[in-house]
Image (cartoon, rainbow, N blue to C red):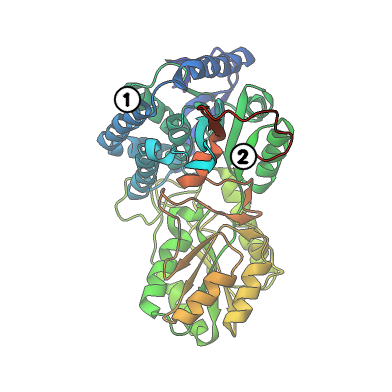
Amino acid sequence: MRNVPMLVNGEIKASETTQFIPVTNPANNEVIAQAPCITDSEMEAAIASAQAAFDTWKDVPVSERARVMMRYQALLKEHHDEIATILASETGKTFDDAKGDVWRGIEVVEQAMNAPALMMGETVENVARGIDTYSMTQPLGVCAGITPFNFPAMIPLWMFPLAIACGNTFVLKPSEQDPLTPMKLAELFLEAGAPAGVLNVVHGGKDQVTPLLTDPRIKAVSFVGSVPVGQHIYKTATANMKRAQCFAGAKNHSVIMPDANKEHVLNNLVGASVGAAGQRCMAISVAVFVGDSRSWIPELASRIAEVTPGVWDDKNAGFGPLISPQAKARVLSLIQQGKDEGAECLLDGSEFTVPGYESGNWVGPTVFSGVTPQMAIYQEEIFGPVLCCMQVETLEEALALVNANPYGNGTSIFTNSGAAARKYQRNVEVGQVGINVPIPVPMPFFSFTGWKNSFYGDLHAYGKQAIRFYTETKTITSRWLEDDIPSGPNLTISID
């Protein structure tokens, strides 16, 4: 049995713990590795290593830090398919989806290569007579990241490259459900020339998360996961005087106007709803059909029915299994609740299985029609390949429905009307909006900007906001005296 190593002070090594969490292949639930619940002393060593490394890393010129990211980006591209294979084996994602996971992370590393430009301050000469004011950005210190199972390459790469490029050091606690991919990312980061202690990777569960939220040496915490855990992490971290950005739940709506291109709508909703088995925080789990577009629902269900789940190396598989038996049980329970509460189940994937992999965490594509806001399948984030279809008469009703939802991660509208699109983007209370784009995840030079119960914090992931999250701004006001030295003290607030 393979034990997942940790990375502490530049050394990839085994933990001395006696407590392990099994890492399974979701397609058959066979154990493929064991993730250690590292010891208290190992956690202390990781944080201490990051603190010691910060004392020197912060003084490394930003251009040299950017070159580390350049080498890292090249190595990630070189090992792209290898990383994707590891990722697929422990998440169950199809190989193409796993490659997309890796690539979206590489794009953020490319953004980290721009650190010299992104960290530039501001200068104004002669703000008063003979006085100049300028600002600069400086690193915080040790930062921490706690990442989920569903994107084991992309989301760690949202965090530590930008933090480290800004001059910080980092302690990463990846999901215990798929830690092999983050460890491969860490190995390549060392190969890129990162000094010992700049990145540390620790493993475990709740007990291993707590020190990252309470230790005074850690200055900022980034988290992606569920709402209750996100709330706990945000409250605990901020109560311990840390910056925190916590990305939590979602219930993403797609609004379909009658004037939209039907073929474009149906093709996009298929992938956006059941792709990656619905285990995306930006998946479209609610389709809101306006007016006559409701007649498209049966054809949409028929097209989704053509998507066949399968194992990661099956080229015909549309998506893979859910991550765990517990996740499968939860999704099946919500599907049953939808039936019990009166929604019409147009497509039922409850009994789906893959021949030869009957013990896997399979749920087939599922489509409900006639869903109402009172139903559990609408109120809860299902995180499975389940699409809820709703019907309204007007764009105003659709806006009211979306805005009444407690989540605000992503939404989209399909229409050929510029007026309808502008009205929707202006009035919808959601952080990321797509217009004829189903899943509006922004490129890394913008920020990932969920709202409401989808995000706790002030500054979002990647883009310019991440640079501000991982740095402090220092403002300097200077005067170099010449011959005209003022006589006597100035007792007012004026700086003239």
Q: Position of residue 415 (x, y in %)?
A: 44, 78
For the N terminus, which image quadrant?
top left
Can residue 394 be seen here? The reply is: yes
At label 2, the amino acid type is Asp
Left or right: where 217 falls relative to 259 = right
Examine the image and state in which quarter residue 20 appears.
top right
Which residue is denoted by mark 1 in the rendering? 192
At label 1, the amino acid type is Ala
Q: Position of residue 180 (x, y in %)?
A: 43, 30
Left or right: where 316 falls relative to 349 = left
Mark nearer the viewer, 1 or 2: 2
Depth check: give the residue in front, 116 or 415: 116
Instruction: Give the distance between the C-alpha atoms of the residues marked 1 and 2, in whole angstroms.
Output: 51 Å
Left or right: where 273 falls relative to 114 = right
Element type at mark 2: loop
For the C terminus, which image quadrant?
top right
Q: Residues within 10 Å of mark 2 (few under 14, many from 20)?
A: few
- Residue 496's tag is 2
Q: Is residue 216 above or below residue 271?
A: above
Examine the image and state in which quarter residue 37 appears.
top right
Element type at mark 1: loop
Residue plotted at (61% across, 61% down):
335
Residue plotted at (51% across, 87% down):
292
Residue plotted at (46% across, 43% down):
151
The tag earlier along the polypeptide, 1 or 2, is: 1
Can residue 305 be seen here? The reply is: no
Q: Is residue 470 above or below residue 443?
A: above
